[in-house]
């Protein structure tokens, strides 16, 4: 006998109930889950702990969210709603528009460092309304820049992969700092002498280290991100210039 249940276990692949209990809605559950994750990290997230914060039993939560995996999909889509994507109004401004998207995505991950650790557990998170809406707007920017259908999606994924990769490392580092109780500057000052000793037998690393001025570590992170972002955009721009039949992008 056929059933209406979808074969794929994802919150985005099943129908949402039309009515929810006024005191305990899916939206309220998701909002509280984000607060829990921001305050205590992903290790503290369970349906029981979330229910306690909401003053409800885990069974009540399951009426709105079928599993912890679905909850992860929902919270990821929730925070993706913070990413800002400009409209594709000026094709000549595509680099700055995409750089703005990249900076906003990185900022979101650093505000919610737990996101980096759950991205591989999100099932069909790409079907979430916030993520799909922002993907649609980003695709519009790539199409306005001159990328053909099909390649625009690949170009977008390339940019997103860079941002997620570097921001994931930053988020892990900042989480370590938070657990240590030290400031970023204190951590860098304490690590400097150990790093210099470790590089004594590695002349190229020592030379690279010496070539970089000892600066505010937060500023270094910002500059490193900006450098990599510009190189990714350089590569995309070079692709546009070399592709046959494409308009020349300034």
Image (cartoon, rainbow, N blue to C red):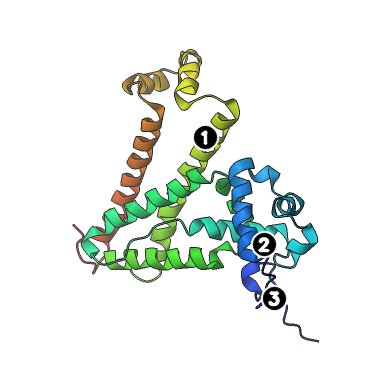
The x, y position of residue 238, in whole percent, is 27, 54
Between 3 and 55, which is closer to the camera in this rendering?
55
How far from the left and from the top, in percent, is residue 3? 76, 83
The mark nearer the N terminus, 1 or 3, is 3
Q: Secondary structure at mark 1?
A: helix
Residue ID for mark 2:
70
Mark whose residue sits in front, 1 or 3 = 1
Mark 2–mark 3 distance (CA, rounded to whole Å): 14 Å
Q: Which residue is mark 1?
A: 174
Q: Position of residue 73 (x, y in %)?
A: 61, 60
Seen in the image, is 137 located left or right of residue 45? left
Nearest the eye: 248 or 133: 133
Mark number displayed over residue 6 = 3
Q: Is residue 147 left or right of residue 13?
A: left
**Label 1 to label 3: alpha-carbon separation:** 39 Å
x%, y% of residue 225? 38, 40
């Amino acid at each position: 006998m056929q059933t209406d249940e979808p074969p794929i276990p994802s919150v985005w692949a099943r129908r949402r109930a039309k009515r929810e209990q006024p005191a305990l809605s899916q939206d309220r559950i998701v909002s509280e889950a984000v607060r829990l994750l921001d305050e205590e990290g992903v290790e503290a997230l369970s349906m029981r702990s979330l229910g306690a914060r909401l003053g409800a039993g885990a069974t009540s939560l399951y009426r709105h969210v079928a599993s912890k995996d679905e909850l992860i999909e929902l919270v990821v889509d929730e925070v993706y709603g913070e990413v800002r994507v400009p409209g594709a109004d000026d094709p000549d401004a595509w680099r700055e528009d995409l750089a703005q998207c990249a900076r906003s995505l990185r900022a979101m991950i650093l505000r919610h460092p737990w996101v980096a650790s759950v991205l591989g557990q999100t099932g069909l998170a790409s079907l979430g309304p916030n993520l799909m809406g922002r993907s649609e707007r980003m695709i519009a920017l790539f199409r306005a820049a001159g990328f053909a259908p099909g390649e625009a999606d690949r170009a977008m994924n390339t940019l997103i992969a860079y941002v997620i990769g570097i921001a994931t490392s930053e988020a892990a580092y900042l989480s370590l700092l938070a657990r240590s109780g030290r400031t970023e500057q204190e951590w860098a000052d304490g690590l400097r002498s150990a790093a210099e000793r470790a590089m004594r037998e590695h002349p190229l690393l020592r030379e690279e280290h010496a070539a970089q001025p000892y600066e505010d570590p937060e500023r270094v992170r910002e500059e490193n991100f900006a450098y990599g972002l510009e190189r990714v955009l350089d590569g995309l721009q070079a692709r546009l210039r070399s592709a046959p039949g494409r308009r020349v992008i300034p």
